[in-house]
Image (cartoon, grey):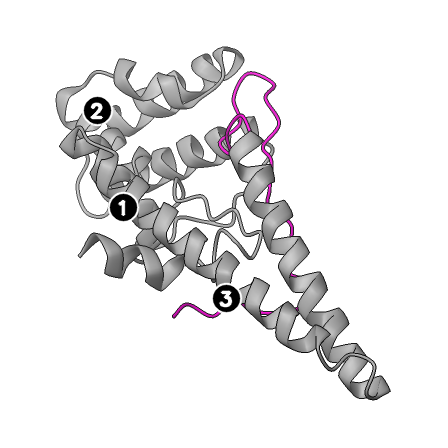
Amino acid sequence: MWRGLMLGAWGACWLAGQVLAHCDTANGPVIPEAKEALESGDVTPVLKWVQPADEAQIKAAFATALAARGGGGDVPAQAEQRFLEELVRVHRAGEGAPFTGIKDEPVDPIVAMADASLAEGSVEDMVHAISGHMAASIREKFARVQEAAAHKDESVSAGREYVAAYVTYMHYVEGVHAAIAASGGHAHGGDTPHEAPAEAGHDVHVH
């Protein structure tokens, strides 16, 4: 299961240089905690998702949502939705990311795997899956370069195939190294997320 989740998303997402944050999804970590806070009447647990300067704004939105719970019709649901959207918007603004609404879609498989590793208290399965896939991908791209190199001087077309394979291989390795060296992709407190570069227009094919 772990390997299936990992391989289904790894090439298309992380190695393509995509930072697919899930804090703006209904199944991400922010929304469920925010709903629990509304049920308990305590805003404290969700304040960790925003910058200190934004706490007062979130507290005010939270108080408004709580007050609306006594209303009838669609008022409580609408007030809750406004609070959730405000919380996610402010959270993403603190990361320097745009807010385009709360998305009701599945969490990306690689993100689900990372969350599951935290819930289970062990990262070993994920490390094993990632390491195995990276090794296989590097070997496959290396072999492609070597094969193309044997024919690179036979024609211009063959030479271009070699160059494409070479660029793909080098960008992939550079991307892996950049991710390993990165301090983290979810920026807080002034940290800058690091991204793996794209593969020069080539898709990553998982085998």
Q: Which disc is residue 113 wearing?
A: 1
Q: Which residue is mark 3?
A: 140
- The nearer-to-camera label among 3 and 1 is 3
Instruction: Give the camera-side residue of 42 and 16.
Output: 16
Segment colored magenta: 182-207
Q: Secondary structure at mark 3?
A: helix
Q: Which residue is mark 2?
A: 37
183 is within the stretch colored magenta: yes
Task: Using the image, determine if residue 10 lies above or below residue 24.
Answer: below
Residue 107 place in picture, x, y as percent: 32, 52
Residue drawn at point x = 58 percent, y = 40 percent: 177
Residue 40 place in picture, x, y as percent: 14, 21
Tell me which label, 3 or 2, sits earlier in the chain.
2
Residue drawn at point x = 70 percent, y = 64 percent: 166
Residue 98 in sight: no
Instruction: Give the camera-side residue of 79 and 118.
Output: 118
Q: CA distance from mark 2 to mark 1?
A: 25 Å
Tell me which label, 2 or 1, sits earlier in the chain.
2
Residue drawn at point x = 60 percent, y = 38 percent: 178
Residue drawn at point x = 53 percent, y = 25 percent: 183
- Crowd tier of the residue under label 2, counting other residues whose Cα lies within 10 Å: few below 14, some 14–19, many 20 or above: some
- The nearer-to-camera label among 3 and 2 is 3
